[in-house]
Amino acid sequence: MPSSNLIRGNAIVANEWTCVTLPPPAEETVRKQAGKVVLFKLTGEVSATPEQIAATQIPASGKVLVPLSVWLARKQELAGRLDKGELGVWLDTHELIESLVEGEADLNDFPLIGVHVERCADGRIFSIATLLRTRYGYNNELRAFGDVLRDQLFFLKRCGFDSFLIRADRSAEEALASLKDFSAPYQGAVDDQLPIWRRINRNAL
Amino acid sequence: MYKYDKIDQTNVDERVAQFRDQTRRFLAGELTDDEFRPLRLRNGLYIQRYAPMFRIAVPYGMLASRQLRKLGDIAKRYDRGYGHFSTRQNLQLNWPKLEDVPEMLAELATVEMHAIQTSGNCIRNITTDQFAGIAPDEVIDPRAMAEILRQWSTFHPEFALLPRKFKIAVSGTKQDRAVVQAHDIGMEFYLDANNQVAIKVWVGGGLGRTPILGSVIREYLEWQHALTYCEAIIRVYNLHGRRDNIFKARIKILVKALGIDEFRRQVEAEWLHLKDSPNTITEAELKRVSQHFEQMPYEVLPAHNASFDAAIASNPAFAAWVKRCVHPHKQPGYRAITLSLKPHGKAPGDATSEQMHVVADLADQYSFGELRVSHEQNLILADVKLSDLFALWGKARKHGLATPNIGLLTDIICCPGGDFCSLANAKSIPIAEAIQQQFDNLDYLHDIGEIEINISGCMNGCGHHSVGHIGILGVDKDGSEWYQVSIGGKQGNDASLGSVIGPSFAAEEMPDVVQRLIDVYVQQRTPEERFIDTVRRLGIAPFKARVYADKDVHKEVAHA
């Protein structure tokens, strides 16, 4: 039984980070659209109340990965942890990365940024990673967690994730294989910005 | 046409291996239905009413004869010996077994084919004009750019899971035949004042539940930027398109909500960062791909052929076929021909395995071994010599492929409907067949002239009913099937959406409803007018009055 479900690069490694989550809201409302329960929050939707943010428990020591809303509201309290290199921040796929970027001189002050995907079908995670890597110059560890399954790994890697916390009920060992699903992708992306026709001479094939 | 190199072959082979493993895991219970669904959909596999439906990609409608033979063989071995050509120029099989699909994909890969992204919330098959490369009115052959877009969109990592499906069409003619205004992105290629290739870009068009024509987001884009501009559009959509309601998730809803000006502003702001990035297309890459679409080795021929002229003069049936099924060609002495998949009383767009083999043989014998699928669901041989037309017609006719009805009333565009599709509210094929039987008289059909009837079994609109001159939409009312009729829709440069004429009809009423619409047209038309022209001149009122003249209005309102 492997002790960790975390993939970094091409290997399974121990997870040194404690993921801090918000306490549940006072009342959970079920939203419906066209008769169906709404599964996805709209981009930019508020994700936490001030009460939730204030009530969020953060371990006093060790490496902690805190929600974006908590970081934004409790920066002063957490600045020391960041200086010690033991604070990372995570956001949900419906949160605006601009709200993270705006307040920071350099995103690389964070040793870790996480993106939480509630449902594996939510492709916003790919654009968020692409923007963090290409637009906002983030170079440190970028981790996908939540409903992270092996069949999305290749795409996640291409969009700049280098760290994947596979959903707890699935094997990270087996998921490793999917990082190599395709060997000759056509288009440029974050991991290799050159499209195939700039990487090799296809006329010579 | 485009031929795979090692890179292309590697990609489809790795896809087969990936899907084989995914299917194995699903059958072993390691993937749930919800987890497997997006994976099978992006390999063209739906779970349907009676069996899975499997959609095979025919990129921009181009097929080689050996590919069509393989399709025929696969339909025979794994299905019931026939396939259905769809309005996205693809081929659908209605009865495969889920556990056979990986093997079917492996067979397709041997002839450079696949089912990649033929469904699912991703960038779908790129479509274009079925006469690309040979049309006399063509300004730019769009196929090289369509192929470049195909490769770029294949497994695009950032756009692997969009809010909803995403369809791109390209066109290089003044008279649009690719319905670019009805796509999520439509690209019209043209030559600018300096004779350089430029693109007019449309966004946010679409049929389906909320039919809407696209808006121009950019009048002028240099061709090199086609991919990066698409990336800017789709990134804005991926981040901000609605995922909370499947019926509001297409890009057209986002464009409408923001307004085209604000949407354009966001896209242009995004594009500033992407412009000139490595996905910018190079001259060398365009040249490499264009080599696959070079002109066929045509013979130098006179513009006229005496034996052809004589056959027309002496054989009225041949002349009728030439009038409807033979199309102009830029090369003197050559023609493009349409093999009708709309014989009266058969499901529109269906072809049997035997017919696929016959068409492949005809392509080899008469048209350089290539053919095309049109979005009107017929097959095209693009490069036939005038002197071969009579012999070709004789053979096509023997196999039920020469119904001279292209562009006429019985050339009905039709989705598979409730006979096959689990989304459908109502059957569509029997309606098409009943209308074809009602109008089963060629002289009368030619007299009625050009008209397009489109039938969709539900508001997803696979039969493009909202741009039909007569559009028929299957609707569900209290568990029974009804049909809503609209008139005045049109595809092309002067595209328009049809107007609903009133309360819906029962299936058995439909042939008579169409008959009445046609009667009004025949009585009211001027000598030059097609059906659509008369509708546009008169509006829907006289048509509506005739159709509902003796209806019990109270009863009709009850199920309106």
Image (cartoon, helix red, strand yellow):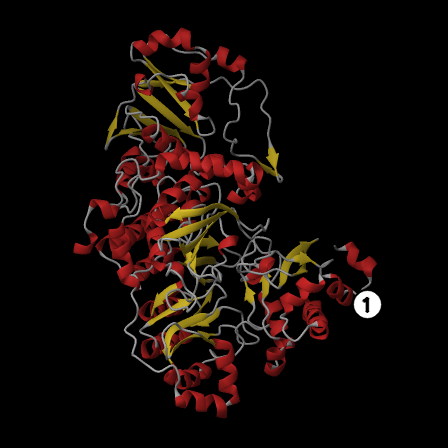
Q: Which residue is mark 1?
A: B550
Amino acid type indicated by mark 1:
Asp
The N terminus of chain A lies in quadrant:
top left
Chain that bears disc 1: B
Residues B346 and B452: in front is: B452
Q: Is B491 above or below relative to B512?
A: above
The C terminus of chain A lies in quadrant:
bottom left
Does residue B230 appear anywhere in the picture? yes
Mark 1 falls on what kind of element?
Answer: loop
Q: In the image, what residue occupies the spot 37% across and 17% down?
A: A104
x and y, in percent, of residue B176 in the image? 48, 60
Residues A18 and B437: in front is: B437
Residues A72 and B39: in front is: A72
Q: Is B195 above or below relative to B445?
A: above
Left or right: residue B504 versus residue B215 is right
x and y, in percent, of residue B511 in the image? 67, 71
Q: Which residue, as the protein is rendered here, is positioned at the far front?
A: B193
x and y, in percent, of residue B61 in the image? 40, 63
x and y, in percent, of residue B527 in the image? 65, 76
Q: Is B342 above or below relative to B227?
A: below
Q: In the image, what residue occupies the spot 19% across and 47% down?
A: A200
Disc 1 residue crowd, few under 14, some 14–19, many 20+, Cα 10 Å? few
Q: Image quarter for residue A16? A: top left
